[in-house]
Amino acid sequence: MPTYRGDAVATPDYAIGVAQAVEAMGVESIWVAEHVVVPAAYGSRYPYAADGRMPLSGDDPIPDPLDWLAFVAGATERLLLGTAILILPEHHPVILAKRLATIDVLSQGRLRAGVGVGWLREEAEAVGVPFEQRGARTDEYILAMRALWSDDVASFDGRFVRFGGVKSRPRPTRPEGVPIVVGGHSPAAARRAGRMGDGFYPLGVNPDELAGLLEVMGNEAAASGRDAGAIEVMTHGPRDVEQARRLVDLGVQRFLISARPDDGVEGVRQLVGRYQERVLAQLGS
């Protein structure tokens, strides 16, 4: 479940309270979003809403997702901790590799790094990242981070990233590094997931569109010598059992539902309980 959209998200009582509450209810994971800045006015079109405007405004608190997850990691034991989605081109991969590995080790392997290319040109410009290069940077940054995580002495010579003869410790708990979940609704995102993702989060698509993207992902995985069945797929949680079954039949393994922090911990608990009862409990019937 993602857990932003509301003033309470940046308060310690909510962050720890909601994480502990959903863990006690058997929720598998908690996911948080990223925007370093939100322009007061922007011309970019948000691709997941009909009006082209994202629900979060510049007045909404949007804590750094990795700092937020590190904070709640110490108050939980089982809950997986994910980013949905970290805007990868806005981060230096050498620094990000260290931050991800640190949280992964301290949480005993519970981190999942959901990454995407971003859609908000004005934010990329504020960070100093060329917007047109975001896809190529994302591909290269994933490879650079994996080199730092897996090689005893790491070197990398790419278009955007270069380093040689370096060591980055601690290493993640898995030899292959922190699991990377590729986010996005485009064929390019599906190909990226098939080529290098441990997971795929196709945002804002219906089951028919999802089927096409999964085919693209599978073809790319096969061309790269990878097993598409090993790539974990997650989507937004459907509202009814019939659509949930259809998504499961397509291969979806995780549903994300959105909580509103201003409803408080008890409001989140009630939301999760209703979804468990009305959708998840009916899947096996």
Image (cartoon, rainbow, N blue to C red):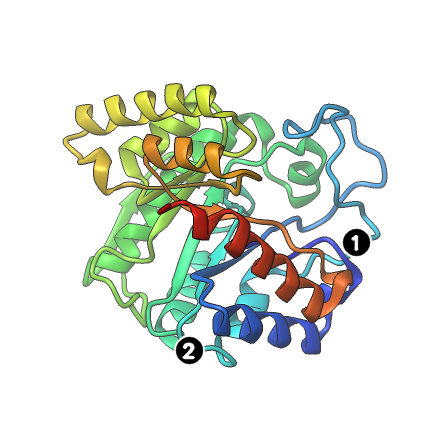
Callout 1 secondary element: loop
Q: Residue furthest bottom?
A: 75
Where is residue 265 shown, x and y percent of the image?
A: 68, 70
**The furthest residue to the left:** 225
Task: Work out whether residue 98 or residue 198 is closer to the camera in this orientation and state it.
Answer: 198
- Asked whether, in this view, residue 145 is left or right of residue 239, the answer is left
User: Which quadrant: the C terminus?
Assistant: top left
Residue 206 x/y as whole percent: 51, 25
Instruction: Work out whether mark 2 precedes mark 1 in sequence or the reverse, and give the earlier one.
Output: 1
Q: Residue at x 44, y 53 (%)?
A: 281
Question: Looking at the rendering, which quadrant does residue 2 occupy?
Answer: bottom right
Q: Is residue 225 visible?
A: yes
Residue 161 visible in the picture: no
Q: Quadrant of residue 160?
A: top left
Instruction: Name the foreground residue: 23 vs 88.
Output: 23
Residue 203 pos. (x, y %) = 53, 34
| Residue linked to disc 2 | 77
